[in-house]
Image (spheres, grey):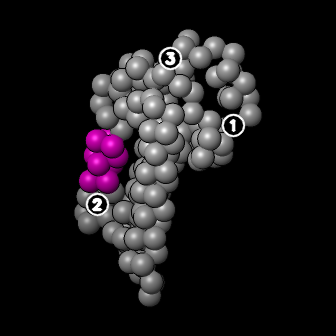
Amino acid sequence: MPRIPPPFIAIVFALLIWLLAHYAPLTRFWFPAKTLVALGVAGMGAALDVWAALCFRAARTTVNPVAIEKASALVTSGPFMFSRNPMYVGLVLILTGVALYDGGASGFLVLPVFILVITAVQIKPEERMMRAKFGDDYAAYCARVRRWI
């Protein structure tokens, strides 16, 4: 199981977005409510992360993705009804907010790379662990809810 916390990975990608926006922006953009929109998108991501964490807490199971083997319950309520990984969707929204705020089009090239990296290094190992731990219940959940959205 990966041992790098996903929020740390997101911070690295946020730094990459900032670096690209400032040193290789491709093109810059600005619109009147850019800061407000950026904060709104990032805020939606943070709210989604908090909602998902509260669902884990209500189920009395671990929210720690680097200790998924400690999961004691399969959480399928709240945002988990729409995405198997709402916390990662939240991180993508936060990174989108960072890219909007920084105003460099090159920052948006980082978003699909983040999705590919987090899928490969975190989500797929989590899925293998969840399949082994929760068996048919997890398989049924996967059949009705998408990995991302």
Residue drawn 54% across the image and 14% down it: 133
Q: Nearer the viewer, residue 86 or 21?
A: 86
Disc nearest the viewer among 3 and 2: 3
Write down the residue under mark 3: 129
Q: Is residue 42 left or right of residue 19?
A: right
For the residues marked 3 and 2, what is the alpha-carbon distance in whole angstroms?
34 Å
Q: Secondary structure at mark 2?
A: helix
Write down the residue under mark 1: 145
Which residue is outermost to the bottom? 32
Q: Residues within 10 Å of mark 1 (few under 14, many from 20)?
A: some
Q: Is residue 46 visible?
A: yes
Give, as a three-letter code, the residue at label 1: Val
Tell me residue 18's x, y (percent).
28, 60
Up-down relation of residue 35 to residue 115 (above or below) = below
Tell me residue 129's x, y (percent).
50, 17
Write down the residue under mark 2: 18
Q: Quadrant of residue 136?
A: top right
For the residues marked 1 and 2, what is the alpha-carbon distance in whole angstroms?
33 Å
Q: Quadrant of residue 70?
A: top left
Q: Is residue 112 left or right of residue 10?
A: right
The residue segment tinted magenta is: 7-16
